[in-house]
Amino acid sequence: MNVFYEDDGHFKVGAIFADNTTSLQVEAPHGKRAKIKAQSVLLRFDSSLHEFMPLAEKVAADIDLDFLWEASGQNEFGFEDLAKEYFGPKPTAHEQAALLMRLHGSPMHFYKKGRGRYKPAPPDALKSALASVEKKRLQAEQQARYVEMLSNFQLPPEFVPHLNQLLYKPDRNGIENKALEAACEALHLAPVRLLEKCGAIPSTHDYHLNRFLFEQFPRGIDFKGQYACELPSDLPFADVRAFSIDDAATTEIDDAFSVVKLADGGWRVGIHIAAPALGVPVGSDLDTAARDRMSTVYHPAGKITMLPNNVIGHFTLAEGRECPVVSLYVTTAEDMRIVGFESRVERVAIVDNLRLHALEAGFTEDNITAGTGDYPYKAELDFLWHFATVLEAGRGKAENGNQQRVDYSFSVESDRVTIEPRRRGNPCDKVVSELMILVNSTWGEHFAKHDVPALYRVQQAGKVRMSTHPAPHEGLGVAQYTWASSPIRRYVDFVNQQQLVAHLLGRQLPFPAGSDLFEIMRTFELAYDAYAEFQRNMERYWCLRYLQQEAIAMAKATVIRENLVRFNDLPLVVRVNGMPVLPSGSDVELEIDAIDFFDREVVCRLRQNG
């Protein structure tokens, strides 16, 4: 006697060689013996053990599932009863086994209710399940088509709307990503390399830019709607002539200066900061838009402004205009000792926007010392340089070595990059930086003295951070330091200006103690760090583009430490694999073997040292 039984969800057959009533000892067709429970037996038969399963499987393959489901009604049943309905009054053992296997293998059509017992699926549930299966089948066919096209370096048209998702945040359950992963595995390529070969990434620059926009500006960089600004008409007018000092590409001119010689031999220096806080109410749509961005984003090929261009046009300190400003007036004695401060909300005439590239040629330390040179506002600028030198010394930062450091300016036009060095700490830099340190530290002191909640920039134990409480900035050598000098470009400065304007005009503070200043600070820090990293990455990218553009095959560099070296004429640091250990500061010459614009890496090898 043989049995057909269920074991752990599988159907098996065996010959009985011991029947212990509640259990059986059976031997499988291949000779293996097993002990099974008697209740596991579904059928007993006398036909050939070896032929039973192949014959049952053949019959099962011919059973029409849809007909079987229709014939089964809607009530629970045993497989023996349905076999009689389907095959006739006396179905054979292998026919019953075939039907049972068909029932068991079709969980969409039949729900298992017990050993050998089933219930037909409700019509709606079956329809939904079948639709799901059909959908998966079609997706599998579509995925296979995608894989074939990608393997032939053809981009499926359906991929175009999903390219950013595929490149920067793959959906592991999406068929596009599954197809891309399968093709990449077959071709031994990274997704970005395969998509490039398929023509999906025509610009490596746009690849990096789009990643940043995808992560930081998911709703796009265009401002939604129109933003109106109402400028106050009753501001007092300051009887000074102010000028700014900025890069030629600067459109968000936040600061300007004025210098007046006093009758007693002293001076009055005006530091005038653009005042968007006067025309952008707290909580307005425009304020919300600026808060969403937190800062202007800079990169060599462009920028993404914190405020819309028409709003910037209202507040930028453009020459030939009378602009609303928050001014800090610093009165000095004849020996340049500071003897007084005064802050005002007012209008100022901006008479000139001086540009660095034109001013730096004449405004030099040699010309200042010798009293020579021909440049605009010579008397005012010469005084400001001497005053800045006094301020620098007062912070304990005189002769700090900045003059030896080199910054680099990037300019990209028509996809060509120009990288030019600028000596840090020249007179233009010193004047602007010292006056900005003065205005920010003075207003920081004002906030602290009058218990006005504000956001501060703090450096202690070498760590720079934002804070809602005043504390020293050790790097600058000041007791407290706030950011309030760039309100068109940074939201922290804008918030601090809102607080300062309200305090100076005797109005209610927009952000009283216990408000959401801390949340603003944390959000700003995250955004500002991300923007700064993007700028560094893109400057590195354009350094590599410059190497390619100028066909530079060899470059001189200086060892920083171990195999880390810095190019002499570019702000580019690379690791040189296989380079022998050389002392820091050693001069080396590198041979450039390859440039990878996706990873922003350059492969170099040591050509010679010394």
Image: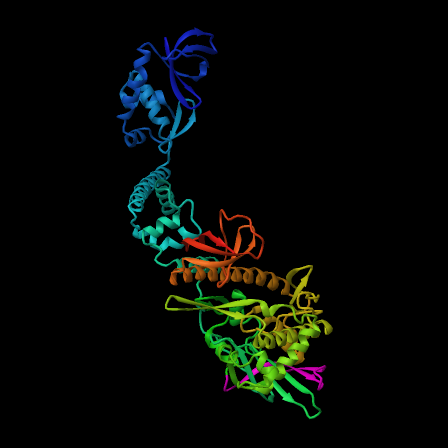
Q: Name the residue: 42% across, 54% down.
A: 592
Residue 567 colored in magenta in the image:
no
Give percent across and percent down for residue 497. Answer: 61, 74
Please identify the residue farthest to the front as the structure is shown: 610
Q: How is the image coloured?
A: rainbow
Residue 100: x and y in percent read 35, 23
The residue positioned farthest toward the top in the image shown: 18
Vertical position of residue 604 compared to residue 3: above or below: below
**Residue 257 in sight:** no
Residue nearest the viewer, comparing 550 with 294: 550
Which span of residues is magenta-colored? 319-345
In the image, is 184 to the left or to the right of 459?
Answer: left
Point out the residue furthest to the bottom here.
Answer: 263
| Left or right of 548 in this view: 377 | right
- As for residue 321 lying within the magenta part, the answer is yes
Q: Quick one: 371 or 521, which is closer to the camera?
A: 371
Quadrant assignment, res 495: bottom right
Report the label total.
0
- In the image, 8 versus 296, the foreground residue is 296
Kindly identify the residue that appears in the image at 57 percent across and 57 percent down. Answer: 585
- Relative to 255, say whether 147 is above or below: above
- In the rendering, at what x and y percent does residue 414 appear? 37, 68
Residue 256 location, quadrant: bottom right
Is residue 457 rendered to the left or right of residue 76? right
In the rendered image, the quadrant that contains the N terminus is top left
Q: Nearer the viewer, residue 608 or 319?
A: 608
Q: Position of residue 328 (x, y in %)?
A: 64, 80
